[in-house]
Image: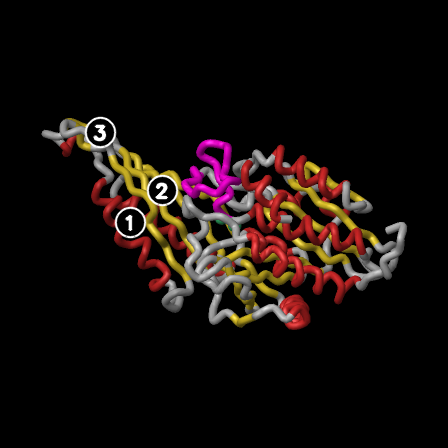
């Protein structure tokens, strides 16, 4: 498992371009005697099905395929050989946990229902999960329950933690472009500078959650980039651009906050006589842990004897696993990558191989509780 993880780590691919990784995974799954292997699922997604042929639930386990456009600065022997691209979120580790689960399903096949292992593309851009469930092939793997995990630096190595209800925030990027017209810097009155409107929005946008009456920490607008005019002294600017990330605990709060931000941008631009263009990108739905699915997950944590904990509140970051809560009762958990481990997306991050067996044990316990196991026979 460790060798496979390190091989995947060496050859990372960014979101939407996971061709070689997907081929590698599909090859592995074919060697595990799966009853069905799906490829090109919502892009380069891959899935396999272990079908008992008996009635019972379809239980889906999900991992991601993509790396990040980050140059790896760590020096492990298995460091990325692709310049500027690295597995800096640990998706290599998540993949290998599911590859291990495929082996276990081969060794002792499910006795009832179906076990589905899904390797989803483009998690980092928030596009992959939605593309997978919109793919016509998804009907072949539509689950009754879905489970996923993410490794978490800052939490003790191998500790597993979850919670009911809200797990990760919804989020979306918004770009607001204000357009007036340029003039000579000696005669700004002959043009229409977006400066005042830009400053107004920079002040107002982060305060929107409070204006909407959301409790502190439940929703936020983070300015991520502001730019106006050209780097020149002779021109009064004609254009400005503001980028902000908008996040909230629930999808309803997120929708209200997005509407309020749009309205605010339109109002400010209209008052200043500027044109406004609004674009959005990287939309993540909130990740919501169904109570029944989370109970199944907690039982599995208990059964494996893994050190487990309850999370005090949802994470503010987003995870596109949230999309699966819209198709099936689902539950997500975090698995500690070590207290002093480099953070996700740090250039020196590397997935800790020690937690592969832990993630695998929890997933297998869920699969066995739901789908059982045939006694292993010589022919299996
Ligand atoms: Zn990431
Ligand atoms: Zn990730």
| Residue 286 counted in the magenta span | no
Residue under pointer 1: 201
Residue under pointer 2: 176
Q: Is residue 292 visible?
A: no
Q: Relative to residue 192, is residue 353 drawn left or right?
A: right
The image shows residue 374, relative to residue 128, as above or below, that is below
Q: Position of residue 103 (x, y in %)?
A: 74, 51
Q: Residues within 10 Å of mark 1 (few under 14, many from 20)?
A: some
* Labelled pair 3, 1 in contact (Cβ < 8 Å): no
* Labelled pair 3, 2 in contact (Cβ < 8 Å): no
Q: Position of residue 308 (x, y in %)?
A: 56, 70
Closest to the observer: 370 or 281? 370
Residue under pointer 3: 182
The disc at residue 230 is none
Q: Is residue 91 visible?
A: yes
Q: Which residues are magenta?
A: 70-89
Dominant SS type (magenta)? loop
Mark 2 / mark 1, whichever is N-terminal: 2
Q: Residues within 10 Å of mark 2 (few under 14, many from 20)?
A: many
The image shows residue 340, relative to residue 185, as above or below, that is below
Q: Examine the image and state in which quarter residue 190 appears.
A: top left
Which residue is painted at 59% across and 51% down in the image? 94
């Amino acid at each position: 498992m460790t060798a496979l993880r390190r091989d995947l780590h060496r050859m990372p691919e960014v979101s939407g371009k996971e061709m070689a990784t997907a081929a590698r995974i599909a090859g592995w799954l074919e060697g595990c005697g799966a009853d069905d292997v799906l490829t090109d699922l919502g892009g380069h997604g891959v899935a396999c099905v272990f079908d008992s042929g008996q009635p019972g639930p379809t239980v889906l386990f999900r991992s991601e395929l993509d790396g990040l456009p980050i140059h790896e600065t760590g020096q492990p022997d298995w460091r990325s050989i692709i310049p500027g691209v690295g597995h800096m979120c640990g998706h290599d580790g998540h993949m290998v946990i599911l590859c291990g689960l495929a082996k276990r399903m081969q060794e002792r096949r499910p006795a009832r229902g179906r076990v589905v292992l899904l390797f989803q593309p483009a998690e980092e851009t928030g596009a992959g999960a939605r593309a997978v469930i919109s793919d016509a092939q998804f009907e072949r793997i539509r689950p009754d329950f879905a489970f996923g995990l993410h490794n978490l630096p800052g939490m003790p190595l191998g500790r597993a933690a979850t919670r009911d209800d809200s797990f990760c925030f919804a989020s979306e990027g918004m770009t607001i472009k204000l357009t007036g017209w340029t003039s000579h810097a000696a005669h700004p009155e002959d043009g229409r500078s977006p400066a005042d409107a830009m400053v107004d929005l920079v002040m107002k946008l982060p305060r929107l959650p409070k204006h909407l009456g959301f409790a502190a920490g439940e929703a936020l607008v983070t300015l991520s980039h502001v730019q106006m005019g050209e780097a020149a002294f002779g021109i009064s600017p004609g254009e400005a651009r503001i980028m902000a990330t908008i996040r909230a605990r629930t999808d309803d709060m997120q929708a209200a906050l997005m509407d309020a931000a749009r309205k605010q941008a339109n109002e400010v631009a209209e008052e200043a006589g500027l044109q406004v263009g609004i674009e959005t990108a990287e939309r993540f739905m909130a990740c919501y842990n169904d109570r029944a699915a989370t109970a199944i997950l907690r039982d599995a944590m208990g059964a494996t004897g893994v050190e487990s904990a309850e999370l005090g509140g949802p994470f503010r970051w987003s995870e596109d696993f949230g999309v699966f809560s819209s198709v099936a009762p689902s539950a997500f958990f975090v698995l500690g990558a070590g207290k002093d481990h480099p953070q996700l997306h740090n250039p020196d991050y590397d997935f800790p191989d020690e937690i592969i067996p832990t993630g695998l044990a929890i997933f297998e316990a869920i699969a066995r509780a739901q789908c059982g196991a045939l006694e292993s026979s010589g022919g299996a």
